[in-house]
Amino acid sequence: MKKALLFSVFLLVAFAATAQSKLLFDETLPESYLIKAGNSQASIHSIINLLQGNVQPDRGGRPNRKPEFVVKYEQQARVIDEGDNLRVSVVLDKINITGDVIYRGFHLGSALLPDQVKYSAKLLNSQNKEIATWSQTTAFHKDRLTLISATIPDTATVQRFMLKVEEKELIYSAESIVHLQQHLDLIQSYYAAEASINQALQQLYSISAEDVDRMTLHDRNLKQLEETFEGLKKASYREKLNLKQHDPQKLLAKMSELEQNLQAKRSAINHALATLDQQFYNKGIAYMNAGNASVAQAYFAKSIEVNPAFAPAHLQMARLDFINGYIKEAATRTLDIMTRMRIDPQTAQIGLALAQDIYGAYIVNGNNFTSRGDYQSALATFGQARNFCSAIGGLRCNLPALNEGEGRAAYGAYRAIVEDGRRFLSRNDLVNAERAASDAQTFQRDYKHVLADAREADELQNKVKQQYYLRHIDQGKVYLSARNYQEALYQFEAALDLEHTYAFQPVRELGPLAQQAAKPVLIEKLRQGYEQAMRNSLADARATASIALDMQNRFALEQDKEVVDRYKQLTERIQTQECINTQAAYDKHQENARELVKGKKYLAADQAYQAALKVAAGMPACNIATFTATDGRMAIAKAVSYQQMLENINHLVTKSRFTEAIAAYEEAEKYYLAEQVGKFGLNHISLFNFARDNQKQSFTAAVIGYYANRQQEKIAMQLLTSLLDKGYSKGKTKKVQQQLGKQLALKDASAGAAGTPKALSATYTNGNKKLKQLGKAYEKEKKRLAKG
């Protein structure tokens, strides 16, 4: 039953589809085009020339004298009625190439297809009238090729149609020639590939993973073979020549064989390269065991070149350096191994034993240098041994032997420096003798652990300084005889400094000689100081006096009458000049105060008087008469107090302390009147004018409130109008406007003023919109009072 139902549904669907679309025209025609010499297309002529002498017929037999081939296909033309539209289609299918198309066993069909097909077509009705036409050129390809696929309106009721395709032409271009040539070259390359594969297989046998000495060469040769194989793969013979169906040379199998061999060889070479450092090392060990150290060293070097961090090879190189007497190089390499490389326990044990031998060699070499008198080399060697010992953990260092050897070398080097200094001293070469003594002392400090009790360097230094001491005295005597007291004093002072610093027998006459040279120098110094004081260079004069006093004490000239008198003259002149300067400064401040008084700047004048008094007080010994400044201050005291009040008021305004400022201004006005400050030529500005002209508008607003609170509404109104005219925000005056409006309304009500609230309000605002709040408050209060 179900099968019957399904079959019925299928019939209905098929009937509906037939009713919707109807095949009006259906034609399938086989067509073929012969391509041969003599064709008008130049490209075809070139294609025939490429085939000439190279191709065979695809069906056997003898080839044509001039190659030729046939392009075959089936042309399917259809017209289908789809109701209101006609669907028109032309398709080329079953495309094939036959004829002289076999080249070295391969069919050239895919390479001989035309590039394009040019055609024209027309759709005719039963009256043979054209309904639609097409004329175009389409790219040609091997697969099913659609020439026309179009839908056109169907306006006829019942008609029959015919679709004709005419003037068809297959077009070959220069690209067709290139395509054919590439295909021919590919086939030739296919046959040549076999030789390349055979050669690669032969070369592959010569690449050995066991030949470590030429491993880099083998790796390079293998890479070249791998590149050759990649080139064969990129040629894509399998796809382009369809080798799966036709492979006369069995190329796919041979390529597979080559690929497997390459992979196996690469695995072996990579393994050899990964362990090349170990392989070079093993060959080096073999040559070492055979007694051929030089060849072994070369292999250890190769191992390190491959892997710079391979510690066993470094260790063997260090051993060879040590055996060959290159202790420094062996130590450096061993130190790197033990402190910077990751090493296995066996290598660490061998390295520690080698380090022990190197340390011992340092000690032996150091002692040998000491025995030969080469103390500096000995100390350098012992220092290297000490550093080597401290750098390598676990090394058993014979420190007593090291300290003993270093001590003998250090004492020898120390004695050598001292002896050099003594020789210089014996030749009276004090410069070099002093340098040697200093070097010996520095050396002693560097090796204080072994030279702590040595005294030779200090003794040499004392002897050198004593010679300098005597030389300074002798040179001072010469200068003293020549009356060059300054140079004589310089030499004697240098001798005195040495006498105080070093412990040697002093020369008794040095003190008197220094005093004899110092007195003329001191007298000249005091004379210069007096001239400085006369020129009013008091800072220089005081400095000179200080130096002179120090010289008196240092050279015991405190009781020398001439020196004392000259020093007294200098100090008195300094004091006199200081008093002259003080009087001048006092007079200057006094004159400045008088000028300020003339300008009615009493506060500044008072400060000038105070400055004059301060100058005089700073030099009480000068007894400056200060009554003029004192009297001047008393004379202007009231004006000063008044101006100080105004100064304080301005400060309060600046700090926005307006209430205090207003109160202070009222006090200033009272003081001005009570103390008759006007006689000083000062005018008092009323609070109204002071507030009106003040730059701080918020202060002016505060004064308006002050007047309002004192029931002085008209003054407050004038100040308010002035403030608003200057651009002050009317919103900030709302409260005081309301206060003034209420107060004015109350006064007018009490006085029985006639008129409406609005009219009376206008007498105060005068139409000024900025006084809107005052007018509203006035009218509201007036109305409230009228209601009683």
Image: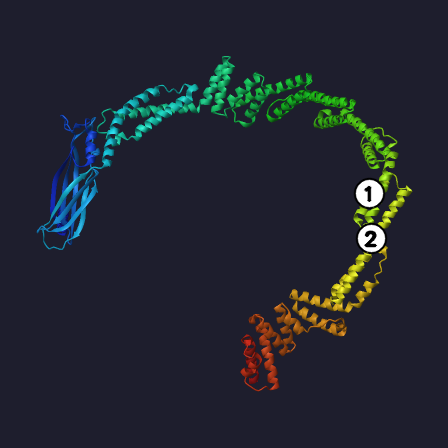
Question: Which is nearer the N-term, disc 1 or disc 2?
Answer: 1
Q: Give the colour scheme of this rendering.
A: rainbow
Distance from disc 1 to disc 2, alpha carbons, whole Å, reads 20 Å
> What is the secondary structure assignment of the residue under circle 2?
helix
Residue 316 is at least partly visible in this image: yes
Question: Which residue has dot 1 on it?
Answer: 547
- Element assignment for label 1: helix
- Percent position of residue 444, x then y: 72, 26
- Displayed quadrant of residue 329: top right
Q: Report the residue that reaches farthest toward the left.
A: 127
**589 relative to 284, above or below:** below
**Identity of the amino acid at label 1?**
Ile
What residue is pinned by disc 2? 578
Q: 10 Å neighbourhood of mark 2: few (<14), some, or many (≥20)?
A: some
Residue at the limit of the structure toward the front, as seen here = 482
Q: Amino acid at mark 2?
A: Glu
* Viewer-nearest residue: 49 or 413: 49
- Report the front residue among 707 and 728: 728
Q: Quadrant of residue 375?
A: top right
Q: Is residue 117 left or right of residue 496?
A: left
Q: Where is residue 266? Give x, y as percent.
A: 37, 25
Residue 11 visible in the current orientation:
no
Q: Give the image location of residue 418, x and y in percent.
A: 75, 23
* Residue for point 51% across, 15% down: 294
